Structure formats: structure tokens, C-alpha cells
Amino acid sequence: MRLICAKNYQDMSRKAANLISAQVILCPESVLGLATGSTPIGIYRQLISWYEKGDVDFSKAVSINLDEYCGLSPRDPQSYSCFMHQNFFDHINIDKKNTFVASGMGDFEANARELEEKVREGGAADLQLLGIGNNGHIAFNEASDHLIAVAHTEKLTESTINANARFFEKKEDVPTMAITMGMGDILAAKKVVLAATGLAKVPAIKGLIMDDVITTQNPSTMLKMHEDAVVVIDRELADAVGYRA
Ligand code: F6R
């Protein structure tokens, strides 16, 4: 695992975006695994700006998103499908037919199977972008005594519901279930880029970068087994976990 320490959120976004744009420039047909949440917004903004300048071309890229809330339609502004369109897909030249966000409507188990099929059909992601939950979750693989390898439905923990309540009018509106790629799907990616910022991530990032333990109670620690995982954090977070470059 390699660690990149950025000056601040903007610098973290630019550094992570650099890794993604390098991937797409080197291999325009790349399969990108994409994440939502507040962390990657700056990364998507940076990629959009480079696309507008003609520096990166997404026309041949394929994308698969990590997860989606159960019970939200793709038109719901809180859905991850809507997030991806608003924050990224609508502003670049990716072919929308080559993007996939699991459906959060109807038969959730069938939707999870469809996500797993997509992951297998497209092959392992060339680059998987990740955020990290306050409890160390990756996609919605929650801290638990076991993790699931393949795409599945997951009951969200109280910690995740509380953290995500900031995006909703009230806590009761936060979905309690999600469809998520499994840990095996994520670890199969050829390259993983995890971005993290903010002091709420201190316990999770401490477990990821400051000790040698791998535990399902902090799913991000599974990345210690990945051959090409890059963690990009900002200085404030690095200082708070006691990391010295
Ligand atoms: C979202 C996802 C989640 C988030 C995590 C952090 O697609 O996979 O694991 O990355 O919950 O969210 P933020 O960035 O909002 O702190």
C-alpha cells in the first residue's frame, strides 16, 4: 500500500484525479470503479475541468459504481445514480450506455446479482476509486465479524446512517439498506485509489495506515493485502493519525 499525503482537500482531489486521468490516458477503454459521497466530489470536479481543457477523453471508458441505496429511484436526488449524473457523467463525454449504477428499486437481491454480473462481465476494474466510512467501511461493506466477497444487500450500521444523515432532511429519511459490491469485487481491481479527508475518518485511517492489523471490524484494512493500493489523505488527517512522511 502506498500513501500520498496532500496539502489539503483540493490538493488531495487533484492528486487522486491525476491517478485516474493517467489511467484513462494510458488505457482509454479502462473500466473505472466509481464511488459517491462527499469525498470524491473534488476529484470529479478536477476530472471535469481536465476533460473541458481536452486533457482527458472518457469516450471509451466504462464505469461501474460501488453501491446504491435500497428504496431510492435513480431520479431521487439522494440516489447515487443521480449523484453520478450531477457530479460527473453529465459533464464529460462518457457514453452513458457504458456506465452502470445498481438499481435501488424493485427486487434488491436481484439487483445485487445484476451488479455482480456487471462486475464479472466488465472484468476486474482497472482502477477502483474508494472513499472510506467513519467505521472503515468500503463501499457499503460494513464493519462486522465477517465480510461478503460478492455484490449483496447490506443493512447499514447506525454509524453510517448517522454519518449520511447530513445529506438528508432528517435522519429517518436515510435508507437503512444498500446494494453494494463485495469485498472480493473490490480487491479484484487492478489498482485501488482510496481518498480520505476530515477528522471523522481518524479511527478508520489509523487502522488502515498506522498498524499491521487486518480486521473485518475495519474493512478498509483488507486493502493491506492489495498489490497496488494507493491511499491519498490530506495533511490534517495525516497529522491527526500521527503519520509522518
Ligand atoms: C459511496 C461509498 C461509501 C463512501 C463512504 C464515505 O459510494 O462507497 O463507502 O465512500 O461512506 O463517504 P463520504 O465521502 O461522504 O465521507
Image: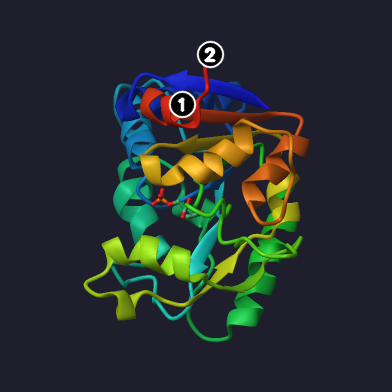
Classify the position of the N terminus by image quarter: top right
Nearer to the camera, 212 or 133: 212
**Residue 184 locus on image (x, y percent):** 76, 54
Residue 61 seen by the camera: no
Q: Which amino acid does label 2 sit on?
A: Ala
Q: Is residue 191 above or below residue 33?
A: above
The residue depicted at 56 percent of the width and 37 percent of the height is: 206
Can residue 37 be seen at all in this image of the molecule?
yes
Would you name the residue on which mark 1 appears? 238
Helix, strand or loop at label 1? It is helix
Q: Distance between the residues labelled 2 and 1?
A: 9 Å
Residue 67 is labelled as none
Few, some or many residues within 10 Å of mark 1 (<14, 14–19, 20+): many
In this rendering, position of residue 48 left or right of residue 146:
left
- Left or right relative to 215: residue 72: left
Q: Nearer the viewer, residue 88 or 186?
A: 186
Of residues 193 and 21, which is closer to you in this image?
A: 193
Residue at figure coordinates x 51%, y 44% from the top left: 203
Counting labels gives 2
Disc 2 packing (10 Å; few <14; some 14–19; many ≥20) = few
Does the Cβ of the disc 2 residue fall within 8 Å of ligand 1?
Answer: no
**What mark, if any, has residue 245 been given in the picture?**
2
Q: Closer to the camera, 60 or 184?
A: 184
Locate residue 175: give its quadrant.
bottom left
x%, y% of residue 92? 36, 40
Where residue 122 appears, as percent x and y from the top left, is 69, 51
Task: Tell me if 234 is positioned left or right of 109 in this view.
Answer: left
On screen, residue 214 above or below 228:
below
Dot 2 falls on a residue whose secondary structure is: loop
Say how the picture is coloured.
Answer: rainbow
> Do the residues bearing badges 2 and 1 touch, measured as CB atoms within 8 Å?
yes
Q: Residue at x 65, y 52 (%)?
A: 219
